[in-house]
Image (cartoon, rainbow, N blue to C red):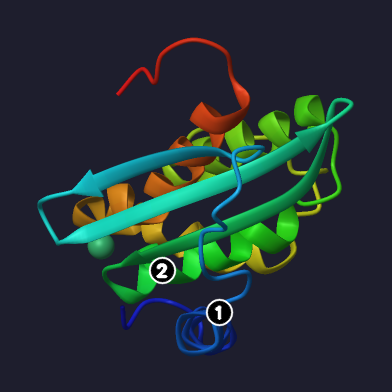
Amino acid sequence: MRKLDNLYRQIIMDHYKNPRNKGIPDDDRYRKEHIRNPSCGDDVTIATLVEEGTVKDIRQDGTGCSICCASASVLSELLEGKTVADALRVSENYVDMIMGKPFDEAIAFEDALAFEGVKDFPARLKCATIAWKAFDATVKDGENDE
Ligand code: ZN
């Protein structure tokens, strides 16, 4: 990832080495979604606790490359405490940012901005978005559209 800015690389490596909110609770109140990306061995589970329309807690677990694991960690911090609608809006705009599409630049992405450079690495796009797609599935009704 030599094109990534140094600061951004440090943020990603920090989340990779010290993952936040890691470990899936054995608690039926959490909605869980598991997604795998066979092309590079990424395997992510997101568990979300929603109460009264607000994301009360996000837990994540899995194995994979640094981009994948770090983005799951960043997601678990960034989206916790938001309403479901706000969390989905941030998540959808994050995916647009990664895919190189127009996105709402007024959103406070915080550490998630570190992944913007991934858009220049087509092979890694899935790595950076897999956790976010899993999160979306935990808060949306109906089927995962993957
Ligand atoms: Zn990966």
Residue at 55% over, 47% down:
47
Q: Secondary structure at mark 2?
A: helix
Residue at 84% over, 42% down:
82
Q: Are marks 2 and 1 in contact (CB under 8 Å)?
A: no
Type of amino acid at the residue the image marks with label 1: Tyr
Residue at 51% over, 35% down:
96
Q: Residue furthest top?
A: 142
How many residues crowd mark 2 within 10 Å: few (<14), some (14–19), many (20+)? many
State whether label 1 is within 8 Å of ligand 1.
no
Q: Secondary structure at mark 1?
A: helix
Question: Could you tell me which quadrant the N terminus lies in?
Answer: bottom left
Looking at the image, is 86 positioned above or below residue 79?
Answer: above
Q: Which residue is more in the foreground, 78 or 119? A: 78
Residue 44, image x and y in percent? 36, 54
Looking at the image, is 113 positioned above or below residue 79?
Answer: below
Residue behind mark 2:
69
Precedes in sequence: disc 2 or disc 1: 1
Type of amino acid at the residue the image marks with label 2: Cys
Q: Is residue 81 left or right of residue 90?
A: right
Residue behind mark 1:
8
Residue 79, image x and y in percent? 73, 49
Residue 30, image x and y in percent? 62, 41
Residue 137, image x and y in percent? 50, 28
Q: Which residue is more in the foreground, 17 or 55? A: 55
How many residues crowd mark 1 within 10 Å: few (<14), some (14–19), many (20+)? some
Mark 2–mark 1 Cα distance, whole angstroms, equals 15 Å
Looking at the image, is 53 positioned above or below residue 119?
Answer: above
Q: Quadrant of ligand 1?
A: bottom left
